Image (cartoon, rainbow, N blue to C red):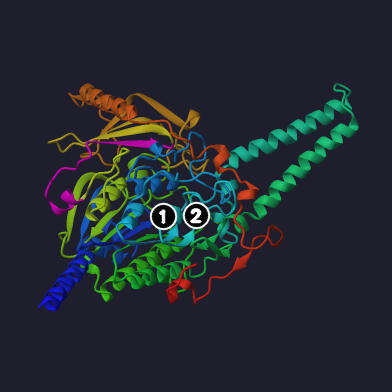
Amino acid sequence: MKILLAFFLLHLTIGNLGQRANTQPNYVLIMADDLGIGDLGCYGNTTLRTPHIDSLAKDGVTLTQHIAAAALCTPSRAAVLTGRYPIRSGMTSFRRIGVYIFAAGSGGLPTNETTFVKLLKEQGYSTGLIGKWHLGLNCESSEDHCHHPLWHGFDYFYGLPLTNLRNCKPNGGNIIIVGARSTVRTAVQVVIVALITLLLLCLLGLVSMPWKALGFLFLAVTLLLAALLLFFSQFRNLNCILMRNRRIIQQPFTCENLTQRMTSEATSFMGRNADRPFLLFMSFIPVHTALYASPEFLGKSKHGLYGDSVEEMDWSVGQILATLEMLNLSRRTLVYFTSDQGAHIEEISESGEVHGGWNGIYKGGKSTNWEGGIRVPGLLRWSGVLTAGRSIDEPTSNMDLFPTIVKLSKAAMPGDRIIDGRDLMPLLLGDVQHSEHEFLFHYCNSYLSAVRWHPRHSSSVWKAHLFTPNFNPEGTQGCFDTHVCLCYGNYVSRHDPPLLYDLSCDPTESSPVTPASEPQYHQILDVMREAVERHRGTLTPVPDQLTINNIIWKPWLQPCCSTMWELCHCDNDTNSSTALNGTTD
C-alpha cells in the first residue's frame, strides 16, 4: 500500500511539473531592421508580398499605434530588452553619432541593466538570439565580451555583434563617407588650403619656418591620410563579423544566403528546445543596408533589391511559423513582430536605386520623431488566447514587451528601477479598452524632442514637438546631406510654443493645432509641460555609453579570428554548423 501511495505521489509530482512546463508560454520575438510600417500588406501595402507576416495580423492582434522608444537601432534595441527609455541606461548620445559603428568600441548595454531575457533564464527558459545585436561587445580586451548577448541572459547567439553596414557588402559603398560626406569634404579642403597657404607664405618670406620642419609637416599629414585610407579599406574585415556564441566563425561575413542561414539557426533552436520553455529573439539583418537577397528571391519583387529582401524576410517568418506548427507549439507560443524603427528613407544606392522603405502616410523616417520614424509594426499572435483579426488603435510602446513577458512568465518585476513599459495583456485580451500609457516621451538621441499625451476618457492623442529636424533638401522627408537627421544646433528648428498635433484626426502631422482651432490649446500644453517636468525628475545620471571615447575604434579591442597581419580573415560557417547538430561552443 505504501509503495502504491509513493508511486501515486511521484506520478502526481511529475504531472504537476509537466503541467507547469506546459503552462509556461514560449516566445518568438521577431524584429526587422529599418522596415517601414507601410512595407507590409497588413498595414496597407499592395505591391510587396508579405503573406506570412500578414498572417500574424489575420490570426492575431494588430497594434496601429505601436511606438519605438527611439528612432535609431542601438537605443531602440536597448529599450526593448530593458523596458526602459534608453536615456536611463546611458544608451543615447549627446553627439552626432547615436549608434555603434566599430566592433572595437568599448561602449555597450551596461551589465547592471536587467533584461527580460535574464529574468526568463532564471525561470528555466532556454534563450536564443539569432541575428543582429548592436549593443556593444568588449570593454577592456578583445575577448572580455562584457557587452556580449551571453552576458545579458542569452544561452545561444548566432549573429552579428555589430550590424550590417554598406561596407559589409563588396561594392556596397562606404557608410562613413556617406554619413559624413560634407564634414569630410570640409576637413580635407581646410587641410589642403592651410598647407598650400603655409607653403606660399614661406615662399614669399612672410612666415619663417625651416624647410625641414615644413617637410615633416607635409609628411605627417600624408602618413595620416594614408593610415586613414588603409583603415577604411579594411573596414569590412574589421567590423563585419559573424559569431556563434563567443567564437567568430566568419570574418568578414558573406551576404550569400545569410537570411537562409539565420532561418536555419532559428528553426533548429526551436527544434532543440521543443520540450522546454524557450525564448527565441529573431533579430533580422534585413532591411538595413547593405541590402542583399538569396538567388531564389533576387529580382522577384516589384521594388528592386529592397523588395527582394523584404519578401525573403517574409519567407523566413513563414518558415518559423511552420516550424511552430510542425512542433505543435503554436498554441503555446506568443509570436511578436515589429521593426526597431521606421524606414531609412535617405538610403539611396550609389547607382541611384532606392534602398529605403516606405512609412506609409506618416511623415519622416528613421532618426526622426515624426511618426514615420517611430510608428512601427506591432503584430502579436497567440493561437487560442488572443482574438484573431483584432485591431487596437491605442498608443503602445516596444518597451511594453518587457513587463508583458515578465508577468506572463511569472517572473518578478525588478523593484530597484523604473520600468517604463506597460503590460500589454489586459489590452490584448480586451479586459481594458484604454492604453496604460497616458504619456510617452520621444527622444532624439539624448534630447527630448516630443511628447505624446492620450488623456483618460478621450479619443484624442496629442503630440507636441519641442524641436524638429531641418530636412535637406527642403521639401523632402529626410536629411539627405547627413544621411540621417541630427538632433542639435543648426540641424534642428526649435519651437516655442511647441508644434501641437492631434494624431487622432491628423496622423500625418500636417496641420498644427493653434489657439484659434483648439479652445483648450494652452491648457493642453500646460499639462504636457508638467508631465515633462515629472518625467525629467525621474532621470538619474548614468555613464554615457555613446561618448566619442566609447565608440571610437580601439585596436586592443578589435575582435579577430586570425591575426591582424592576416587581416582578421576566416570562414568557419559550414552547413554542418553546431546549431544544426545540437551542440554549442
* Residue position for label 1: 33
The quarter of the picture where the N terminus appears is bottom left
Question: Which amino acid type is shown beneath numbered disc 2?
Answer: Thr
Determine contact: label 1, label 2, CB under 8 Å.
Answer: yes
Question: Which amino acid type is shown beneath numbered disc 1?
Answer: Asp
Using residue 172 as the reference point, say whether residue 415 is left or right of it.
left
State the image coordinates of residue 89 (x, y, percent, origin top left).
Answer: 41, 39
At mark 2, the secondary structure is loop
Please report whichever mark, 1 or 2, sits nearer to the chain's N-terminal start. Answer: 1
Please say whether residue 126 is visible from this viewpoint. yes
Quarter of the figure with residue 528? top left
At mark 1, the secondary structure is loop
Q: Which mark is residue 63?
A: none
* Residue stretch rendered in magenta on the structure: 425-445
State the image coordinates of residue 583 (x, y, percent, origin top left).
Answer: 45, 72
* Residue position for label 2: 163
Other residues around mark 2 within 10 Å, as few (<14) / some (14–19) / many (≥20): many
Queried whether the magenta region covers residue 432, the answer comes back as: yes
Residue at x-position 81% and y-position 38%: 218
